[in-house]
């Protein structure tokens, strides 16, 4: 098991194409981020051409993922059946405990990180918050995608929670792209669960690398169902957990996915509400 220093050094790929072909996703993500930063320094016309090409490739790959998801149940069954036959009823029990633990963790996170700050800072109680986000949360709960609920979420935050238009239009779409605490919590719990399931040592020296890998993986979650599981591959690879564990998670991911996606949406609305409150306080404050 490599230490934290070795893990950080391993983030820089010697050959990005070799990293892609070998399934080393985390170094590939780092290379992509650095490449994007370098591309941002190019002239506008060159940068626009590169962005248009990247957007087209991204759309095509997301469409490909949707096709794969249609056939995924058969593949997941084929992958998880041997593991279930080997581990027996104990695996089902462990998965049930894992799902319950994730849901319990999400509820605690919502209470501590959303409801408490909203009540103290913005004066918005749980009843008003949940009723004011019910439409968007219902869409996300059924589709497991915060992007599909974006128009409804924007309207509800402005209408029901009195978030100003310029704050909502900036913070909520940005949050839908980058702020996914529910996915991060699930992925962290999944790493610990799979490490225990496969009897993979998880020393303290690997915690830093796992946290960084989970953080970067959460930023790469695409707006498609179960993408939080698929983007977990770099984190699993970083701590030496077999990627076959992804098939086990995919078999039960629908329930956690509904709740973590809803947690993501509620977090985006919470962030917009608190930012709006901070902006109002800054405007109303007398000049020092």
Image: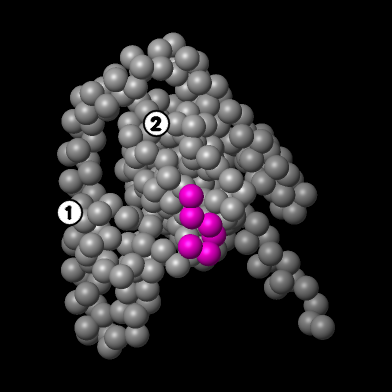
Q: Is residue 102 left or right of residue 41?
A: right
Image quadrant where one finds the C terminus:
bottom right
Front: mark 2 or 1 = 2
Rate crowding at label 2 as few (under 14), some (14 to 19) or many (20 or more) other CA atoms within 10 Å: many
Please say whether residue 3 is one of the residues in the magenta stretch: yes
**Image location (x, y in percent) of residue 53:** 18, 68
Q: Which residue is mark 2?
A: 249
Q: Is residue 115 left or right of residue 260?
A: right
- Residue 42, compared with residue 127, is above or below; it is below
Q: Is residue 82 left or right of residue 211?
A: left
- Residue 155, compared with residue 127, is above or below; it is below
Q: Looking at the rendered structure, which numbered label has been put on residue 60?
A: 1
* Residue at the outermost top position: 89
Q: Residue at x 18, y 46 (%)?
A: 64
Q: Residue at x 78, y 73 (%)?
A: 285
Distance of label 2 from label 1 (alpha carbons) = 25 Å
Residue stretch rendered in magenta on the structure: 1-6
Rate crowding at label 1 as few (under 14), some (14 to 19) or many (20 or more) other CA atoms within 10 Å: few
Between 120 and 51, which is closer to the camera in this rendering?
Answer: 51
At mark 1, the secondary structure is helix
Q: Residue at x 73, y 67 (%)?
A: 281
């Amino acid at each position: 098991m490599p230490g934290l220093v070795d893990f950080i050094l391993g983030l820089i790929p010697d050959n990005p194409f070799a990293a892609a072909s070998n399934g080393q996703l985390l170094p590939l993500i780092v290379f992509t981020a650095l490449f994007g930063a370098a591309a941002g320094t190019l002239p506008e016309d060159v940068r626009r051409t590169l962005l248009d090409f990247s957007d087209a490739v991204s759309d095509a790959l997301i469409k490909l993922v949707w096709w794969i998801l249609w056939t995924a149940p058969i593949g997941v069954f084929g992958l998880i059946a041997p593991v279930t036959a080997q581990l027996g009823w104990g695996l089902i029990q462990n998965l049930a405990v894992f799902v319950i633990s994730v849901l319990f963790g999400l509820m605690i996170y919502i209470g501590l990180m959303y409801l408490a700050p909203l009540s103290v800072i913005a004066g918005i109680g749980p009843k008003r918050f949940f009723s004011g986000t019910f439409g968007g949360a219902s869409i996300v709960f059924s589709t497991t995608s915060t992007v599909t609920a974006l128009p409804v979420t924007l309207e509800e935050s402005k209408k029901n929670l009195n978030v100003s238009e310029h704050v909502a239009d900036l913070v909520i779409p940005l949050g839908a792209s980058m702020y996914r605490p529910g996915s991060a919590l699930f992925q962290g719990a999944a790493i610990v669960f799979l490490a225990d399931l496969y009897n993979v040592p998880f020393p303290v020296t690997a915690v830093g690398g796992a946290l960084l890998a989970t953080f970067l993986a959460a930023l790469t979650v695409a707006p498609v169902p179960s993408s939080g599981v698929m983007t977990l591959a770099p984190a699993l690879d970083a701590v030496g957990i077999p990627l076959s564990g992804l098939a086990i998670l995919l078999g039960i991911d629908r329930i956690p996915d509904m709740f973590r996606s809803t947690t993501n949406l509620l977090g985006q609305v919470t962030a917009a509400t608190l930012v709006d409150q901070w902006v109002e306080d800054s405007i109303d404050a007398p000049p020092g």
